Image (tube, coloured by chain):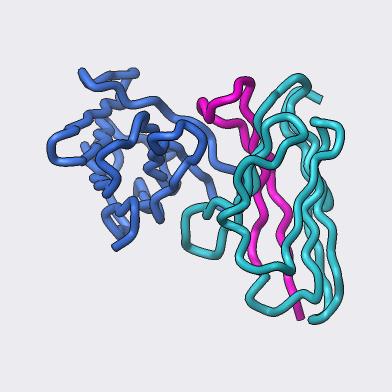
């Protein structure tokens, strides 16, 4: 497609379950970013990939969060043993070059942990 | 102190009004600055980049003051469709990390 695609759009899980969120960036985009957005807040940086290399994961809130982009295109954000505080919208963005030029965002995955 | 701070809002203005949003950032080495707009339950979308000399795009004017570490967005002749949250975004000095402000919500009323 033409834009950044994320799936699922909505995810409901019970506390303690593992979840996996998918991001399909714009074709050919080198940089890929994951953000977490709580209600009423701006997006908070989680992690950044340049092709398949994860160059910055300083924003991941705990070791329960793991992201990968094995072939430099599609990325998966995995959250293990989910907690209620993980409930948020998870946004993926991509940009064409190696630096964070203006980013194109996907619609996000709205995660609710019960 | 947060890296990027914005007017808390919300701003409720009548159609046709002029409204200005302010944003301050703490990292003096920040490279680039942007305004994004986010509609309710939608993804952020780039509104405009902010250049050192200031720039204008139709009814929107962005200003940057590096000495005061301050960015502004002015919207003239506001329309109902301008209702959204406006996010100030700062690119750090490594050129890899976008830092978003908390956003300022604008409601333009008929």
* Residue at 30% over, 52% down: B6
Q: Quadrant of the N terminus of chain B?
A: bottom left
> Quick check: A99 left or right of A33?
left
Q: Nearer the viewer, residue B4 or B47?
A: B4
Residue at horizontal 20%, vertical 18%?
A: B53
Q: Is residue B14 magenta?
A: no
Left or right of B42, for residue A2: right
**Chain A tint in image:** cyan
Residue B94 found in image quarter: top left
Residue that appears at 35% across and 30% down: B31
Residue range of the region highlighted in magenta in the rendering: A87-114
Most foreground residue, A53 or A10: A53
Judging from the image, what is the letter of the chain drawn in blue? B
- Residue B28: x, y in percent? 25, 40
Q: Position of residue A61 (x, y in %)?
A: 61, 66
Residue sitting at 42 percent across and 36 percent down?
Answer: B91
A83, above or below A58, in the image: below
Measured from the top left, where is residue A28 in percent x and y? 75, 19
């Amino acid at each position: 497609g033409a834009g950044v695609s994320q799936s699922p759009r909505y995810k409901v899980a019970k506390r303690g379950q593992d979840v996996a969120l998918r991001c399909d960036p714009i074709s050919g985009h080198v940089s890929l970013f994951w953000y977490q957005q709580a209600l009423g807040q701006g997006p908070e940086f989680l992690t950044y990939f340049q092709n398949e290399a994860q160059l910055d994961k300083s924003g991941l809130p705990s070791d329960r969060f793991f992201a990968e982009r094995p072939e430099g295109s599609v990325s998966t954000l995995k959250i293990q043993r989910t907690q209620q505080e993980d409930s948020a919208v998870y946004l993926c963005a991509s940009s064409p070059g190696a630096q964070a030029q203006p980013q194109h965002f996907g619609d996000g995955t709205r995660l609710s942990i019960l | 102190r947060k890296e990027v701070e914005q007017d808390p809002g919300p701003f409720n203005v009548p159609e046709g009004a002029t409204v200005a949003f302010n944003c301050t950032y703490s990292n003096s080495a920040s490279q680039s600055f942007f305004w994004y707009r986010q509609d309710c339950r939608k993804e952020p979308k780039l509104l405009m980049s902010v250049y050192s000399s200031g720039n204008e795009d139709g009814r929107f004017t962005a200003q940057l003051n590096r000495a005061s570490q301050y960015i502004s967005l002015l919207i003239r002749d506001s329309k109902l469709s301008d209702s959204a949250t406006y996010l100030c975004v700062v690119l750090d000095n490594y050129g890899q990390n976008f830092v978003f402000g908390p956003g300022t919500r604008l409601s333009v009323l008929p």
